[in-house]
Image (cartoon, rainbow, N blue to C red):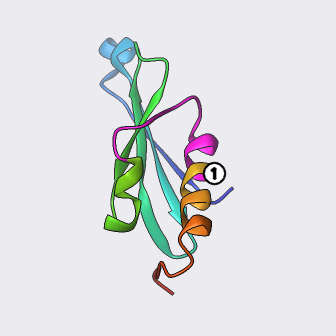
Amino acid sequence: MSFQSQIVSSPPARQAQTRQAYVIEIGETQAGLVARGADERFFTFISASAAFDRLEGQRFATPVAAELAARQLVRSRPGLRLAA
């Protein structure tokens, strides 16, 4: 997988408040990240590049689903330039 995981958590006493966040990269380009709180079922996409603004705010069941959506977006826009 090309996404990088980062789990951001609160101190142990507040472990129930854990938030999960994963960086989504396509090649060398950071497309964005997906994040969800402990009480949330879906991951919300936060765009890190204008090329991926169409995904901003969309919700995904998994980080892999968000990565696939970002890859499909790149394929659907042949002239799109990403970092090398």
State yes or no: residue 77 in magenta: no
Q: Secondary structure at mark 1?
A: helix
Q: Amino acid at mark 1?
A: Leu
State yes or no: residue 65 in magenta: yes
Q: Which residue lies at the image location 50% right of the left edge and 55% below the top edge?
A: 24
Give the residue furthest to the right: 1
Exactly how many numbered labels are in the figure?
1
Position above or below: 39 against 30:
above
Tell me where residue 12 sits by quadrant.
top left
* Residue occupied by mark 1: 68
Position above or below: 16 against 82:
above
Give the residue furthest to the bottom: 84
Q: Which residue lies at the image location 51% right of the left edge and 87% below the top edge?
A: 84
Position above or below: 63 against 25:
above
Q: What stretch of residues is rendered in magenta?
A: 56-67
Q: Which residue lies at the image location 58% right of the left edge and 50% below the top edge?
A: 69
Q: Which residue lies at the image location 63% right of the left edge and 60% below the top edge?
A: 2
Q: Position of residue 15 (x, y in %)?
A: 38, 16
Q: Position of residue 58 (x, y in %)?
A: 42, 37
Q: Looking at the picture, tell me which residue is in the foreground, 17 or 27.
A: 27
Q: Position of residue 1 (x, y in %)?
A: 69, 55
Mark 1, other Cα within 10 Å: few <14 / some 14–19 / many ≥20:
few
Position above or below: 53 against 51:
above
